[in-house]
Image (tube, grey):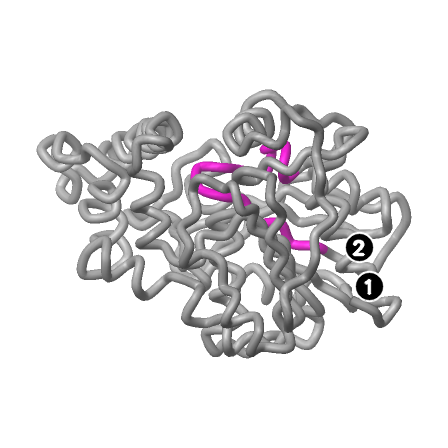
Amino acid sequence: MPQVASNYSPPLFFKSGHLSTIYSGIIRSVNGVVQKRERITLLDGDFLDLDWSEANSPTQKLVVLLHGLEGDAQRPYITGSAKILNQNGYDACAINFRSCSGEPNKLYRSYHSGATEDLIELIDHILNTRDYAEIYLKGFSLGGNLLLKYLGEGNVVPKEIKGAVAVSVPCDLHSSCRQLLSTKNILYAQRFKKNLLDKLRQKQLLFPDLISDADIKRIKTLKDFDDIYTSRAHHFTDAEDYYAKCSSLQFLPNITVPSLIINAKNDSFLSPECYPFVETEKNPHLFLETPDHGGHVGFWGKNNITYTENRALHFFDSFQKKTL
């Protein structure tokens, strides 16, 4: 599908990619969302915590929300999404990836950008325990990459899944990592690394034979973390093997569920490879929107409803109206 025109035009302050990103990640708050937690046991004995919020009246429509790197189901971009969806007739199921719900997961492994096996189990759980005729997916950053990989890597996608929206997606993980390691993103990278190392030290207490003090001292960058932990724990050769196998870019041609990707042109986390113009031109099921502004998951909107929250609602509603 050709690129979708964007009408996102924020006030001057939010035209800055960095200011948009920081406001969304640190300053913004969302109130009024009531979440109920459900813990499910996975086939490997680990667990996922799901935070459910319901529409104002019974519905057969659900949106599954997937957070980004070191996020959780209480981040404003998740609760903001849940709030507008609940107000417009959709239940929301916000996933906390392994180790992201406030409690370390049980196994040596954790979550990563391509762990679609957990999404598969979650969707199976929903279909087996709930009665939804329509299920939509909405993911941010890492979560966006994961859902696009799921839709295109050859899984049997249930008929109930009608559409997807992916926001600020690092479709090419290797080049996106290089962006994060650049000087302009040093503060973000340091924040991510600190959080990841804190969790790795918790995991070391559970698996002292698998994670040494020397390993932790060797981690100077996010790529080092993926070389030393992510790749080992999830059966990749090294970080580059992980990036190559889990980048969603290679799977986009195979997606048959209508999917909208929204990547801002001033997103400092994204490389040129993360704007899949060629892939969307060739796939009638893919829609690509590239606003000039927005930063990384930083799309401002009036009344504390972001542009991408309104945009996703319109996209999902369009399936009832039969127009995209």
The residue carrying pointer 1 sits among few (fewer than 14), some (14 to 19) or many (20 or more) residues within 10 Å by Cα, namely: few
- What residue does disc 1 label? 318
Q: Position of residue 222 (x, y in %)?
A: 28, 39
**What SS does tag 1 mark?**
helix
The amino acid sitting under disc 2 is His
In this rendering, position of residue 203 left or right of residue 98: left
Residue 207 against residue 31 in the figure, above or below? below
Q: In the rendered structure, which amino acid carries the disc numbered 1?
A: Ser
Region in magenta: 63-78
| Contact between labelled residues 1 and 2, with CB atoms less than 8 Å apart | yes
| Cα–Cα span, label 2 and label 1 | 6 Å
- The spot of residue 18 in percent (x, y) is 50, 29
- Front residue of 82/300: it is 300
| Residue 203 position within the rendered picture, expressed as x and y whole percent measured from the top left | 28, 36
Which residue is at the front of the view, 259 or 232?
259
| For residue 204, above or below residue 27 | below
Query: What label sits on residue 314 in the rendered view?
Result: 2
Q: Residue furthest top?
A: 27
Quadrant, the N terminus: bottom right
Give the image location of residue 14, x and y in percent.
63, 29
18 to the left or right of 159:
left
Secondary structure, mark 2, is helix
